[in-house]
């Protein structure tokens, strides 16, 4: 027979575990250099992808050191000084980045605009006349692996030249010199 006290103790222990799992702050990966109140400036950036507003992650760097990072959509406060603003487009498989040098003055706002150009790539595979599963490795022009796409999944990539290695079961085919243009919706069909 279980007593009410032991049941209550077990429930308290379980509740404590749940509270332990769900409470507690999430550590941010942002570091901001110390500054006196009111002495800093702001950096604002706007980003477009194929002429349309887009989202991006912004890092403000001083030399090799990260000063702070945030969404490009939010204004970023920093102490006066010379910085490099590094913006990485959200949602693109190749994680394209652009950089701009900037000078922030006390009480001022620096605005920077970034324009990216991308295309969408989709892979379909057929084996013996029927749709089949597989994976595609996307490599840049230098041969560096960018990422992988599953069959039917779309990947957004910067315009440019790519190599694809398409795998279906134990077989593979390479597609060299695939060129993607601004705004293109490219469907590549591969038969095994």
Image (cartoon, rainbow, N blue to C red):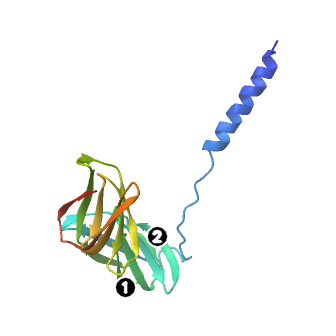
What kind of element bears circle 1? strand
**Residue 108 picture quarter:** bottom left
- The residue indicated by pointer 1 is 102
The foreground one among 143 and 128 is 128
State the residue lying farthest toward the front. 128
What separation in Å lies between label 1 and label 2 (alpha carbons)? 15 Å
Q: Quadrant of residue 19?
A: top right
The x, y position of residue 131, in whole percent, is 27, 47
Q: Nearer the viewer, residue 148 or 189?
A: 189
Q: In this view of the protein, can residue 81 be seen by the observer?
A: yes
Name above or below for residue 52 compared with residue 176.
Answer: above
Q: Which residue is mark 2?
A: 69
At x 31%, y 53%, the residue is 153
State the image coordinates of residue 122 (x, y, percent, origin top left). Answer: 25, 58
Q: In the rendering, at what x and y percent does residue 36 appear?
A: 54, 77
The residue at the far top in this view is 1
Residue 167 disc label: none
Quadrant including the C terminus: bottom left
Query: Label 2: how many residues lie within 10 Å, few (<14), some (14-19) or many (20+)?
Result: many
Return the x and y of residue 42 as percentages of the image width and height: 39, 74
Residue positioned 49% across, 87% down in the render: 63
């Amino acid at each position: 027979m279980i007593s009410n006290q032991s049941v209550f103790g077990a429930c308290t222990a379980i509740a404590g575990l749940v509270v332990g799992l769900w409470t507690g702050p999430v550590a941010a990966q942002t570091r901001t250099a110390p500054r006196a109140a009111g002495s800093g400036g702001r950096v604002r950036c706007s980003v477009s992808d194929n002429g349309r507003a887009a989202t991006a992650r912004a890092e403000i760097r001083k030399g090799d050191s990260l000063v702070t990072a945030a969404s490009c959509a939010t204004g970023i406060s920093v102490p006066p000084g010379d910085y490099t603003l590094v913006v990485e487009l959200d949602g693109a498989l190749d994680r394209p980045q652009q950089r701009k040098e900037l000078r922030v003055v006390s009480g001022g706002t620096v605005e920077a605009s970034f324009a990216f150009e991308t295309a969408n790539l989709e892979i379909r595979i057929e084996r013996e006349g029927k749709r089949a599963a597989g994976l595609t490795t996307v490599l840049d022009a230098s041969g560096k692996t960018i990422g992988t796409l599953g069959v039917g999944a779309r990947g957004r990539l910067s315009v440019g030249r790519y190599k694809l290695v398409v795998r279906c079961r134990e077989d593979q085919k390479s597609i060299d010199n695939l060129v993607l243009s601004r705004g293109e919706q490219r469907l590549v069909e591969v038969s095994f």
